[in-house]
Amino acid sequence: MSTTPRRLRAAGKWLLSLPAVLFLAGNVNAGEAFPLGTKQDPKDILLELNEKVDSDYLDAPQKILSMPNNPAYWDAEDGKELFNQKRGPKNASLANCDFGQGPGKLKGAYAKMPRYFEDTGRVMNPERRLVYCMKTLQGFSEDSKAVQNRGELKQMLTYIASQSNGYEWAPSMNHPMEKAMRDAGEAMFYRRAGKLDQNCATCHYEPGTNVRASAMPSVKIPEEWTKAVSWPAFRLGKRDIRSPYQRMRGCYYQMRKGLLQPRTDAAVAMQTFWLDAARGQPAILPDLKR
């Protein structure tokens, strides 16, 4: 357990800015204080990807320098505490939650999701599965404060994701429903709609695309795309951790499309396509983004 009180760590994140993170770079390695899924440092993963392709998106000094000081490790630490804490009407922890590799086995599990689960008859992404376990193992209801607390859900997701750092993305495609989800997500990705008549490919298809002077990752370049879909991630601009769902919702808002709801088939389908497009590339979890 961390010696730094949770409230103090949260306050510290709000004080962070890009200059502050860059100033600390090289002096403090937050990742050393929290065990990730592999011993490979997220910064080293990013550097290796950068060597493989000529990419303005990956070759950004502020991203590389700030990786060792990612405040998301604090969220992962808090998430680990919540995950193993006995809570709910059943006074149980989530230590026996099965994310596809057996109860309590988290190493590499996040990188192999979304996937079909026999016990629910549904394809589930990590957030949907986490809430399912909170209901079945801990006895929480859908409208309980615990399930509706997105801050705590993000912290637990960050912890679960951290155990897949460095693992290759390999969402399961063994069940017909998994393939159907992937195909539905692909259709959503390329479907133009909304007041602006845009789709995800508007920003994320052609290599070298820039939006407001920012280099955009291309779904056609797996080395770029793995960083793009490595969520949860700490957003320097937001000074907070962000989940995969929040990234989807943000893009939908920017395209002026309808509001995407969390843990729905639509959200699961989009994430399935995202991660299938990054298949074989190492996950950077948790990531740090501008």
Image (spheres, rainbow, N blue to C red):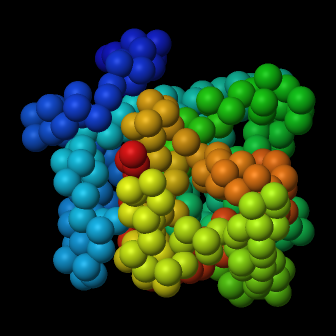
Rendering coords of residue 212 (x, y %): 45, 54
Q: Nearer the viewer, residue 255 or 73?
A: 255
In-front residue for pair 82/44: 44
Q: Position of residue 32 (x, y in %)?
A: 23, 42
Q: Image check: 72 left or right of 246?
A: left
- Considering only vertical position in the picture, is 203 above or below 106? below
Q: Residue at x 47, y 47 (%)?
A: 233
Q: Which residue occupies 24% across, 65% down?
A: 59
Does residue 229 appear left or right of residue 133 in this picture? left
Q: Is residue 164 visible?
A: no
| Quadrant position of the C terminus in the picture | top left
Please give left or right for residue 96 compared with residue 39 in the image.
right
**Residue 232 x/y as whole percent:** 52, 49
Residue 109 is situated, as x and y percent measured from the top left of the image, at 55, 64
Q: In this view, does 252 lie above or below 184?
A: above
Q: Residue at x 77, y 72 (%)?
A: 192
Q: Which of 120 and 43 is in front in this view?
A: 43
Of 132 and 171, the residue lying toward us: 171
Answer above or below: position of 282 versus 148: below
Residue furthest toward the left?
Answer: 27
Instruction: Tell me which corner region of the image, top left, top right, bottom left or bottom right, holds residue 23.
Output: top left
In which quadrant of the rendered image does the N terminus lie? top left
Residue beneath the point at 65% across and 69% down: 200
* Residue 211 in view of the camera: yes
